[in-house]
Amino acid sequence: SSDVASLEPPPKLQPPPKSPVRSRFNPFDKGLAIQDEPVVDEVGPTPALGDAAAIQRESAESPSTPLFDEDTSQPLEEFRPKFEGDGWEMMLRHPNKKKITGNRYWKKVFVRMTEQNILYLHNSREDSDPFQEVPLQACYSLSEMGAQQFDAYGKIFTVKLQYVFYRERVGVRPGQIHKVMQGQITSMGQFAKLGLPLEHAPQVSQLLKLGTQNWEDLKSFIQVVEDALFHLQIHRDRALTYKTEEIQVTVQDEFIVEQDKTGHVWKQKARVRVFFIAFVTGMPDIEVGINDLTRQGKEVVGRCDIMPVVTEEWIRLENCEFHSCVLQEEFENNRVIKLHPPDACLFELMRFRIRPPKARELPLQLKVVMRVSPRHVELRADVLVPGYHSRKHGQVPCEDVQIRFPIPECWVYLFRVEKHFRYGALKSAARRPGKIKGLERIIGAAQPLETSLIEVSTGQAKYEHAFKAVVWRIPRLPKEGQGAYTSQLFLLRLDLTSFDQIPASFEQHVAVEFTMPATSVSHTTVRSISVSNENPPEKYVRYLSKHEYRVEMELQTGEVPPSETEISSLAAVAQQAPPYEPATTAAAVATAATSDDSD
């Protein structure tokens, strides 16, 4: 026993040596020896939080460019300018509800928003007393902006103020209907064995439908109403019971870019809005964890609360604003987003700003050139979708692409067509300009090929008087079956007469709008959703980014060169002409006759 007590602990082993960093060499070059270099720790000490040189730990799938701009010397510009007007001249759809026997019409109104978040509807701007008051509630929401025919000359932009509530009802899976149609289900007992899922179905009740023919007025109205709904006070006052508990989160990025004619981005702004809806039992506490740089390494959540994420990306949040149901003290002290959500109500949980990095490839690139001569005008636009987002997220298309080319007022009549009950617009020809295929190749050999006013390689373009511009709409870029770096072309040709005027100045900016699903400009990621209930609910997170570009077009003056189609038509006419024969003179005929007589 004394020998056992006298035993000493085993000696500690030295840590294994670090593997040396080898310099790059050519293995086929036998004369070059491999040189070992000492290992250098390039990381250095971790800087304090908030420093501009904060190190971002990224995985191999992360982009090579930084996730945000580290320069914080300049204050952030307002994302959208505040509305300073008295109200909006709008149209009200009256009566509010549709009736089978009655007709609805548009009624002129003047809309005001008070500080108490009440919408006042006046018959005119001069009226002091409104004929209708609509107090805004937190459960109200605005629909997507739409457009419908207003009169014989144009359309009107519309938006609906609506109340949306949800009911838990029995739903049917798509595969169950297919089995019933095929005769695989012959009794209610077999149908019951399949199981009927419970779904939360929205019930929409329309309160107001407003419209205006001014696009900017409607956008400013939507901005003011959304800000008012975001700052309304609402609390969870009672405990409900759900058979199927569910939480849905939508992360929506908004990205505004201003670009010059050389492709240089001289201004960009980004904002993130997080929408939340919860169907949970009781009065639980909910914590939402996002990839905030100040929370890196401090997250403590359960395994069932973690949301699957692809990469480890951490971003810096600025100018954070929260809904009234979020506990502000928890965020200020611990940077934790803790809330008691209202029941079955879709609301905006938070919004914050980020600084996009300066050296990043845009998901959609546009080059516009306008050539103006005394008799011809040519507008050409090339659209390209690069492969940056495709490399990281897979094939992510740009959807609902809308490109607006402004047209001077004096040239509008060239695009209008008179129809039976209204005025229409000339639509584009869906072919690639300059390339003749199929039947057109045979027709072009017999007669010159007619050129269209507007030609596009995909989508459709036409003049829309509501925008006072030619609008090129593309459902998806790149198209089905196409990859990245596929260029699309828009070509507009105008032949002016001596009576047509040429404006002294042109609007030199083109507006672009599109959305990208399942992506985010800010790299915001919902990492966890924790609920204090025993049974964790189903959790869904959806990402969406909305882009708005303002691109400067290149304006060129002078003679416009002939297009490829015009060159091909001229070549077809030249082939039909008879071969050239020199004219025979009388002296040449007499000389030929004399030579024949001498023989």
Image (tube, rainbow, N blue to C red):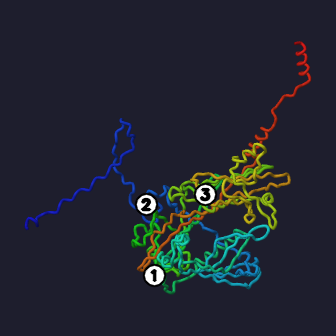
Q: Is residue 174 left or right of residue 107?
A: left
**What amino acid type is highlighted by mark number 1?**
Pro
Nearer to us: label 1 or label 3: 3
Tell me where residue 181 sits by quadrant: bottom right
Q: Position of residue 240 (x, y in %)?
A: 49, 85
Say which label, 3 or 2, has the lower sequence index: 2
Nearer to us: label 1 or label 2: 1
Whole-number angstrom distance, CA of label 1 to CA of label 3: 43 Å
* Crowding near the residue tagged with mark 2, few <14, some 14–19, many ≥20 C-alpha atoms within 10 Å: few
Residue 443 seen in the figure: yes
Question: How many discs mark residues in the rendered view?
Answer: 3
**What amino acid type is highlighted by mark number 2?**
Arg
- According to the picture, the residue beneath numbered tag 2 turns out to be 57
Q: Where is residue 215 in the image (x, y as percent from the top left)?
A: 70, 68
Looking at the rendered image, the quarter that the C terminus falls into is top right
Q: What element carries label 2?
A: loop
- According to the picture, the residue beneath numbered tag 3 turns out to be 477
The residue closer to the viewer here, 278 or 439, is 439
**What amino acid type is highlighted by mark number 3?**
Leu
Q: In this picture, is 276 found above or below 314?
A: below
Q: Where is residue 332 in the image (x, y as percent from the top left)?
A: 47, 75
The disc placed on residue 48 is none
**Measuring 50% from the left and 68% from the top, which residue is drawn there?**
317
Q: In this picture, is 462 found above or below 433?
A: below
* Crowding near the residue tagged with mark 1, few <14, some 14–19, many ≥20 C-alpha atoms within 10 Å: some
The residue closer to the viewer here, 545 or 43, is 545
